[in-house]
Image: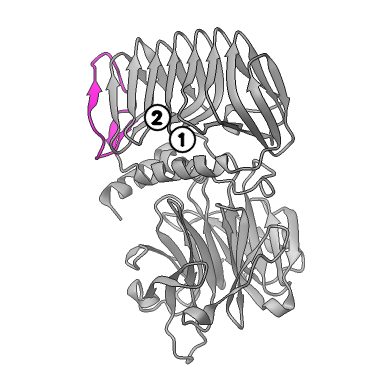
Amino acid sequence: MKKISGLLLERSVTKGFFYLVAAACWLVFGSATYAQTMQPRLWITDDFTRSAYEVTLNGELLSSFPIETTLGAPSEIDFNRRDGTLWIVSENPGRLINFSTTGDQLGEPILAASFGTKGTEGVAVAIDGFADVLWVVDDPVPGSGPTPTVFEVEKNGTVVSRFATAKYDPASISPQGIAIDPFDGTLWIVDNSTDTIYNIERTGELIQSLPLGADTSFDNLQGITVSTSDGSLWVSDRGSDRIYNLSRTTGAEIFSFSTSSYDPASENATGIAYQPSVTGIVEMVSVLAFNKAKFKLEKGAIINGDVGIAENSEADLKDGEITGTLFIDPDAKKIKLDKKVPILGGSVMADLSRMVAHVVQAAKMTGDLKPTQEFGEIKESTTIFGDSGLNVIQVKKIKLKDNTLTLVGDAQSEFVFNVTSEMAIEKGSVIVLQGGVTPNQVIFNLLGKDKLKIKDDSIARGTFLVLDGEAEIEKNSLIEGAIFVGKELKISDSELVGAQ
């Protein structure tokens, strides 16, 4: 782990920036079928009931499905944010099985024996840029020959890398669960022989360990997952029949609930997975310039939030104010900062490459979503009614002059606009949100190289993804939300307020 990463994680504890950046960067929807709520949730497997449970973070049951006896007892589970499916590991024989969230088996299982192990106790889906591989930790039967090993595996069963658990702790002989950290890509492994949670590099070097053996609350730790909203850990414990939310730095309990809260028959909770909310761009940087972008701040413009200048990008901050922190990648180009531009949160050097990769991935996958509504050109005042859940709007272009675009939904509605051509909000036009919809729940994804223009006393609300085009916010206009631009961004005589 790079030293700067440690610095940023330390900042994130107090400021909430990078935890929520990472949550935002996991903005990958996969398909509309699984994105039916704004709220994150947990998936839990039980090898006594042989079921998978979808529950709230308070332990209330949302749904469940049985796992066929012929597939073996379920040990671990993880949620794939790329496509909205589940991966479940069965024991005896060890198999990695892909399921829909309604319990339909997808494709043929991957046999653990195909990559040289006799038992599989954990699975996690690693999303690293555009990579999509499985990380597996095995727990062979004592005396069977193989030593516990961590595998990086492609979905056809091909091993990419491997290392023995002894690399991070020779005493770790019974690893039970594994998770990918969505913020720095490291691994978390829980072992019930040492009663310890390990955070390790993807090559096996130990970063930190959280011994839990002195806490009598725990009795046979099993699964582990990482929250994408605050970075905390969730673990399942089959001895106490409880699900625990723990601090990632100390292992201290934050919250817990009994497995009986979602099923009185649940006695052997094994795996656990965290499914984030769909539109996770909340409290991310308000502005991100990347991919050789040029960012200009002029004529008293104000950004109420954080700003990121990524690798190969540059900034010319002539006149205005940034109320948050300016994050500058070490490989950013020229940063011109006039004395007339106060940065109230100061400037911090930070490696933003992982964040950029996930934003690019997010835009790509958002663009692949199947539309629920389609429009040609929106150029007059228009009201769009959305369902509670995900609403994907395909539109050729948006050109408003002294008009309103009104989005009506509720607190659970999410609106994703895929705009294939230009988008212009001009001459006092306003994007209006009604029924409990907030800017955090709205995304405008410009798919081409056309320009985004917000000008002339106009107000726009939402998160704007402009990967291959330019964007101008000028002439006393306002954005409530965030904007990520990969070419050129100018904010002049206007204000951007980061979504809360």
Residue type marked 2:
Asp
In x, y percent, where is residue 83? 59, 53
Do callouts 1 and 2 mark residues in contact (Cβ within 8 Å)? yes
In x, y percent, where is residue 154? 48, 67
Q: Nearer the viewer, residue 375 or 306?
A: 375
Asked which secondary structure carries label 1, the reply is loop
In x, y percent, where is residue 312? 28, 36
Residue 38 magenta-drawn? no
Residue 306 vs 146, above or below: the answer is above
- The single residue placed furthest to the right in the displayed view is 264
Q: How many marks?
A: 2
Residue depicted at 58% across the width and 39% down the height: 279
Q: Is residue 212 in view?
A: no
Residue 336 magenta-drawn? yes
Left or right: where does residue 314 sit relative to residue 202? left
Asked which secondary structure carries label 2, the reply is loop
Question: Which label number is shown at residue 284?
Answer: 1
Q: Is residue 331 in view?
A: yes
Per the image, the residue denoted by label 2 is 306
**How would you classify the magenta stretch by its main secondary structure?**
loop
Residue type marked 1:
Met
The answer to which of marks 1 and 2 sits earlier in the sequence is 1
Badge 2, how many Cα within 10 Å: few under 14, some, many 20+?
Answer: many
